[in-house]
Image (cartoon, rainbow, N blue to C red):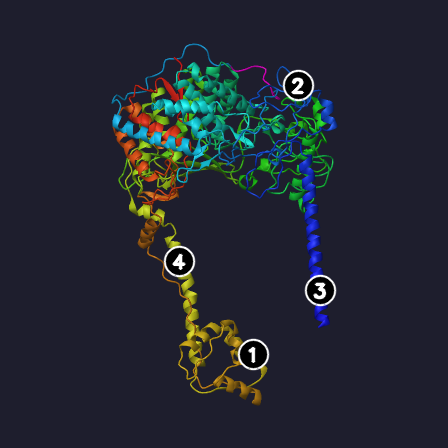
């Protein structure tokens, strides 16, 4: 008894000891974090679970600055006011042209440093959910206007003079359809009331649950995006209420760490400018222009890079934005090339030419590269906008033995490794990241001006400064920056592979060779498309030409060059059961052939809702530039989207789908110019079942050995069966053979035992123990056999039939080709003519009705009004939620599920285009206005 008590006490003491150790170990883990959190300037750091959004930082007292920063400034820190846009005073004189990085060393405002500020991202995300503070935080961090690091010696001016004469765009003369307009306005008003009641001031309404969603910086995206729609539809009181709410928006602060420049420009900046334009630029609505200028200043800061290409995801907090940066090497084309209309209109109204200069330089870069891409006339969806060629390691005297590991997120100058330090093979990824983060955090904490520089923590590089021999000498042997690793897994690019060196260093020119826009990968596959990631870049070419009064021919030339390539390479006639005369715009994949060095083009016959804008673009361009064939192409492209709407169970087009291109005799697709295409059901079924021959062969290959095995098993079973007892005696070898035989045929013996008749039912045993079943204890004959074996040393088997052979699995014959196709069409709910529905949802997109609107205004054909109304009724029938219209999950289902999402473009674009389709064409005429990609109206010059 005593021993048991001692054991219990010992175990209890041991448990107490373990708990104490764990407690103090946890404390030791938390205390350093708490110490660091307390030392971070501004505080606000919290431990939070992964995936949780950061809460607003509580008010904190200003901490004491480090000695270095205290010596660098003479003024105490003053928290910026809520709308401060004043520049920070410089401590050194600014160069009249471009300022070198080393010249810029202002007294930095000492602000909270957060994890999201430390490491910039190569590619951001447009929609990021944030938690909007319920009240204004007094000590919230605000963007401040700082001196430019790469200032300009001259500014590209807006074209002056009278606008050129342009062709008349509109032909429609049917007047307004008041009955349909009333229904559309009622829907818009109902959606607006739902937003106002349930999500006022937030970005988006959740129309099913009545909640809200903040995904675009929590500035009220739906509110701003809907302004000109409210005015155009005659909802003037709702417009006035929204304008009052705009006064309270502070574009200098946001709970989100970065600003998506493209989304912010088209929704917020475009919405403010359009509202100011359509309301007649009245004095009582001056706040709209003021807020547009305020936001424009913030966005303009994203262009402060060596080559003036914007940082498309702009980290706005002064801790980061005050440092010099460059655009990234992987930029989405549409996010780079779809800023021109909004910045141009801002420059026109505000009289500040720098906004036009910002986008004009982007246009110049696109124009320079346009005819030198893999598909001349177009640009790939992903672009290297860094302006920095041959990004490579800066290697010190020692040899770099190994390339950087896969998966290390590189950043120009964000981190560095000491030159000459050996790179270890083991744990290299983690060590590099930790070291880089440590150095960066130290640099930020000390207020170094070099954090986030293009090259590294050492002396910076200015474009053109590499021509200075002194600058080159200073760079040799400098700290080694980490090389970009973005896209290595997919690009297979030589440019993204670290070069090997043996006792060799890179000279200054190897560090950053000036270049224009270029491919993000020299060897990876590139995509050329009119769909997502590219669409609005091409859309803005003719529209910018219109907004500038036809005075800048570059936009006309760029549009014509792109349109020719699109017609030749992307646009094709799909094969449909009704032999419809329609067109589809697909994707062109261009790959690199490592053997020949040539490029291989492959048309992917997939399209989507985003691509439906192209019909309106071609029709508009055809009128503007006297290309009647483009108007016809625009008609057929738009009819292709109408066909897709009419093909589904809901009467709504899917987000993305795949079809079969009509082909010439040589197998190449028929493009938009050619005639002729007949439905071929045999080919359609072959596309749905491309592996039927393989499937049949595979069935034969696996059936043959199984049939043979079954025959062997049956023969073995017949030869070993006996109605009488058998005495198994002999040597160990004979017993071993029998044991092996039974193991090999264990499943067959077990099955035969089950189906055979026996006076004494046998106990079912696992197949794995079939060879040991005679050793199991039992009753009846089994027990007697065991006893007999023990007594005589020999094993007796009962007078019972041997187990029958197991049934060997024989796969069922595959479906016939016809049955397979029929089942696939049924199971996948494939609309006629579509081979795949890549994405089945509908998120209230406007692109199809946008092109229908353009085709009606340009041609005057009533067909487009009928087509548009059919689209409207289908959408209303399937998407009406509790508080507004909602996205749905699957347009191929007769009763799709609601997704509880209403993006701001539903009120800003989709309902507006439906309204304009049935409005009097003399109102809001395309001869007087140009619309941005979010359907915002900008006044055309006269």
- The image shows residue 659 at horizontal and vertical percentages of 35, 41
Label 2 vs label 1, nearer the camera: 2
Residue position for label 4: 697
Mark pair 2, 1: CA separation: 93 Å
Mark 4 or 2, nearer chain start: 2
For label 1, the residue is 736
Nearest to N terminus: mark 4 or mark 1: 4
- Which quarter shows the C terminus? top left
Q: Nearer the viewer, residue 190 or 390?
A: 190
Side of 698 where 785 appears, left or right? right
Question: Label 3 to label 4, Cα distance in Å?
Answer: 71 Å
Dot placed on the residue nearer the N-terminal end, 3 or 1: 3
**Residue 561 appearing in the image:** no
For image coordinates 43% across by 66% down, the residue present is 705
- Residue 489 at x, y percent in the picture: 55, 42
* Res 65 → quadrant: top right
Q: CA distance from mark 3 to mark 2?
A: 71 Å
Earlier sequence position, callout 3 versus callout 2: 3
Q: Which of the labelled discs sits on residue 90, or is there none?
A: 2
- To which residue does mark 3 refer? 9
Residue range (magenta): 148-156
Q: Nearer the viewer, mark 4 or mark 2?
A: 2
Answer yes or no: do the residues labelled 3 and 2 have beta carbons within 8 Å? no
Q: Quadrant of the N terminus?
A: bottom right
Contact between marks 3 and 4 (CB within 8 A): the answer is no
Label 2 neighbour load within 10 Å: few <14, some 14-19, many 20+ = some
């Amino acid at each position: 008894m005593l021993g048991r008590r001692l054991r219990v006490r010992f175990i209890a003491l041991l448990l107490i000891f373990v708990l104490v150790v764990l407690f103090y170990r946890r404390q030791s883990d938390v205390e350093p974090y708490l110490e660091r959190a307390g030392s971070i300037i501004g505080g606000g750091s919290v431990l939070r679970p992964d995936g949780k959004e950061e809460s607003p930082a509580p008010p904190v007292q200003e901490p004491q600055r480090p000695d270095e920063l205290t010596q660098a400034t003479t003024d105490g820190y003053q928290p910026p006011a809520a709308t401060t846009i004043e520049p920070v005073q410089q401590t050194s004189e600014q160069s009249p042209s471009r300022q070198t990085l080393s010249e810029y060393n202002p007294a930095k405002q000492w602000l909270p440093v957060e994890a999201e500020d430390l490491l910039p991202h190569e590619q951001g995300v447009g929609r990021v959910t944030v938690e909007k503070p319920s009240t204004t935080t007094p000590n919230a961090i605000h963007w401040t206007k700082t001196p430019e690091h790469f200032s300009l010696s001259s500014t590209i001016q807006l074209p002056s003079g009278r606008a050129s004469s342009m062709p008349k765009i509109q032909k429609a003369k049917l007047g307004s359809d008041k009955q349909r307009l009333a229904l559309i306005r009622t829907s818009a008003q109902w959606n607006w009331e739902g937003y106002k009641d349930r999500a006022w001031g937030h970005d988006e309404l959740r129309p099913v649950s009545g909640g809200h969603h903040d995904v675009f910086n929590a500035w009220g995206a739906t509110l701003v995006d809907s302004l000109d729609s409210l005015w155009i539809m005659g909802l003037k009181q709702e417009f006035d209420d929204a304008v009052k709410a705009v006064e309270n928006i502070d574009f200098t602060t946001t709970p989100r760490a970065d600003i998506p420049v493209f989304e912010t420009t088209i929704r917020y900046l475009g919405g403010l400018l359009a509202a100011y334009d359509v309301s007649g630029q009245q004095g009582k609505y001056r706040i709209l222009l003021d807020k547009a200028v305020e936001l424009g200043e913030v966005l303009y800061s994203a262009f402060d890079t060596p080559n003036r290409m914007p940082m498309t995801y702009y980290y706005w907090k002064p801790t980061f934005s005050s440092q010099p940066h460059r655009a990234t090497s992987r930029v989405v084309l549409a996010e780079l090339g779809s800023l021109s209309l909004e910045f141009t209109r801002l420059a026109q109204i505000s009289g500040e030419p720098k906004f036009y200069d910002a986008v004009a330089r982007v246009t110049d870069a696109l124009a320079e590269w346009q005819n030198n891409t893999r598909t001349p006339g177009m640009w790939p969806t992903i672009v290297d906008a860094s302006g920095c060629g041959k990004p490579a390691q800066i290697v010190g005297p020692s040899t770099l033995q190994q390339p950087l590991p896969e998966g290390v997120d590189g950043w120009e100058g964000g981190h560095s490794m000491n030159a000459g330090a050996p790179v270890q093979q083991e744990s290299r990824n983690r060590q590099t990241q930790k070291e880089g983060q440590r150095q960066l955090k130290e640099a930020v904490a000390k207020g170094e001006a070099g954090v986030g520089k293009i090259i590294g923590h050492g002396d910076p590089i200015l474009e053109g400064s590499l021509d200075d021999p002194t600058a080159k000498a200073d760079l040799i042997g400098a700290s080694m920056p980490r090389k970009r690793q973005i896209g290595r897994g997919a690009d297979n690019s030589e440019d993204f592979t670290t070069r090997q060196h043996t006792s060799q260093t890179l000279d200054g020119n190897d560090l950053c060779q000036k270049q224009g826009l270029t491919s993000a990968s020299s060897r990876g596959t590139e995509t050329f498309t009119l769909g997502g990631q590219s669409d609005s870049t091409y859309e803005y070419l003719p529209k910018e030409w219109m907004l500038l009064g036809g005075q800048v021919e570059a936009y006309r030339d760029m549009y014509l060059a792109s349109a020719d390539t699109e017609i030749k390479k992307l646009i094709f006639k799909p094969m449909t059961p009704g032999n419809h005369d329609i067109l589809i715009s697909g994707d062109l994949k261009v790959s690199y052939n490592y053997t020949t060095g040539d490029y291989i083009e492959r048309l992917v016959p997939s399209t989507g809702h985003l691509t439906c804008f192209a019909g309106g673009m071609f029709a508009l361009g055809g009128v503007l530039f006297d290309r009647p064939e483009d108007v016809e192409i625009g008609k057929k492209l738009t009819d292709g989207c109408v066909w897709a709407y009419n093909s589904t169970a809901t009467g709504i087009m899917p987000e993305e789908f795949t079809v079969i291109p009509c082909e010439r005799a040589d197998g190449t697709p028929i493009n938009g110019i050619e005639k002729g295409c007949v439905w071929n059901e045999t080919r359609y079924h072959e596309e749905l079942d491309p592996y039927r021959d393989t499937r049949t062969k595979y069935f034969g290959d696996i059936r043959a050995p199984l049939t043979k095995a079954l025959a062997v098993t049956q023969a073995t079973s017949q030869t070993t069966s006996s109605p009488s007892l058998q005495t198994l005696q002999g040597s160990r070898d004979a017993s071993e053979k029998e044991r092996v035989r039974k193991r090999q045929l264990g499943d067959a013996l077990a099955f035969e035992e089950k189906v055979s008749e026996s006076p004494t039912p046998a106990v079912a045993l696992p197949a794995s123990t079939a060879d040991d079943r005679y050793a199991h204890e039992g009753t009846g004959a089994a027990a007697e056999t065991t006893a007999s074996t023990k007594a005589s040393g020999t094993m007796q088997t009962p007078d019972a039939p041997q187990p029958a052979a197991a049934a060997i699995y024989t796969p069922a014959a595959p479906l016939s080709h016809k049955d397979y196709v029929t089942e696939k069409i049924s199971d996948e709910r494939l609309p006629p003519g579509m081979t795949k529905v890549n994405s089945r949802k509908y998120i209230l997109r406007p692109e199809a009705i946008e092109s229908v609107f353009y085709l009606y205004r340009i041609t005057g054909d009533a067909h487009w009004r009928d087509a548009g109304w059919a689209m409207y009724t289908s959408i209303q029938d399937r998407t009406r939620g509790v508080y507004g219209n909602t996205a749905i999950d699957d347009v191929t289902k007769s009763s799709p599920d609601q997704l509880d999402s209403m993006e701001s473009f539903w009120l800003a674009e989709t309902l507006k285009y439906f309204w304009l389709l049935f409005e009097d064409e003399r109102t809001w005429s395309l001869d007087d206005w140009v619309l941005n990609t979010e359907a915002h109206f900008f006044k055309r010059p006269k």
